[in-house]
């Protein structure tokens, strides 16, 4: 009987010890917004928000101070559209056409027929805006690249 308990202890001991290990989680940095997010929305930014959120914009954006600040940060500071013409500078990355549209609020939202960097609305796309790292996407059949900077930079 003593052998049985000894064997049982040696079999169960590793499970008990592994359950006691603490996992060190690396906390995320506090998000620091640039001063320009405190400025009022421009007409263009309001149109971009309304295009994506439709009649839900007041409920989900305009009445939520943090979300509004976050969206202003995305539109003003974190989305960069870059024209790259040198073949050596071009990157292998996902195409814009592979990114699903954010159609949770406006079901009939559509992709732009042609890409115009001045009219591009990044809120229409389900980009990983809240990821820890930056992302880059290629605009199909163009030399444009969209860079989404991390909010933790």
Image: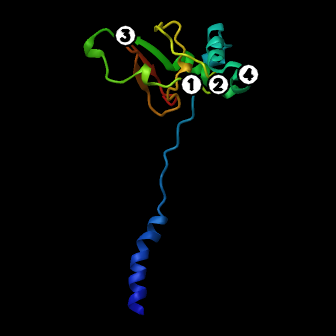
Mark 4 closeness class: few <14, some 14–19, many ≥20 residues within 10 Å: few
Which is more toward the observer, 5 or 116? Answer: 116
* C-alpha gap between disc 1 and disc 2: 8 Å
Mark nearer the N terminus (2 vs 4): 4
* Residue furthest out toward the left: 88
Residue that numbered label 2 is attached to: 105
Q: Is residue 71 left or right of residue 98?
A: right
* Residue furthest out toward the front: 108
Name above or below for residue 152 compared with residue 71: below
What label sits on residue 25 in the rendered view?
none
Residue that numbered label 1 is attached to: 102
Name above or below for residue 144 compared with residue 33: above
Quarter of the image where one finds residue 89:
top left
The reply to whether callout 1 and callout 2 are in contact (CB within 8 Å) is: yes
The residue depicted at 31 percent of the width and 23 percent of the height is 92
**Helix, strand or loop at disc 1?**
loop
Q: Is residue 113 left or right of residue 58?
A: left
Quarter of the image where one finds residue 136:
top left
Residue that numbered label 3 is attached to: 142
Residue that numbered label 4 is attached to: 58
The residue depicted at 39 percent of the width and 76 percent of the height is 11
* C-alpha gap between disc 3 and disc 4: 35 Å
* C-alpha gap between disc 3 and disc 2: 29 Å
**Helix, strand or loop at disc 4?**
helix
* C-alpha gap between disc 3 and disc 1: 22 Å
The residue depicted at 47 percent of the width and 55 percent of the height is 23
């Amino acid at each position: 009987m003593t052998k049985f308990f000894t064997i049982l202890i040696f079999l169960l001991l590793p499970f008990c010890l592994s359950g006691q290990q603490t996992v060190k989680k690396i906390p995320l940095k506090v998000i620091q917004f640039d001063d320009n997010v405190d400025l009022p929305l421009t007409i263009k930014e309001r149109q971009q928000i309304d295009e994506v959120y439709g009649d839900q914009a007041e409920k989900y954006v305009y009445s939520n101070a943090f979300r509004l600040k976050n969206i202003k940060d995305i539109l003003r500071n974190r989305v960069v559209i870059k024209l790259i013409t040198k073949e050596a500078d071009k990157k292998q990355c996902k195409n814009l056409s592979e990114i699903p549209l954010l159609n949770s609020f406006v079901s009939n939202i559509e992709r732009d027929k042609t890409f115009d960097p001045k009219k591009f609305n990044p809120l229409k796309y389900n980009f990983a805006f809240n990821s820890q790292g930056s992302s880059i996407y290629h605009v199909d059949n163009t030399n444009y690249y969209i860079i989404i900077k991390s909010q933790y930079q």
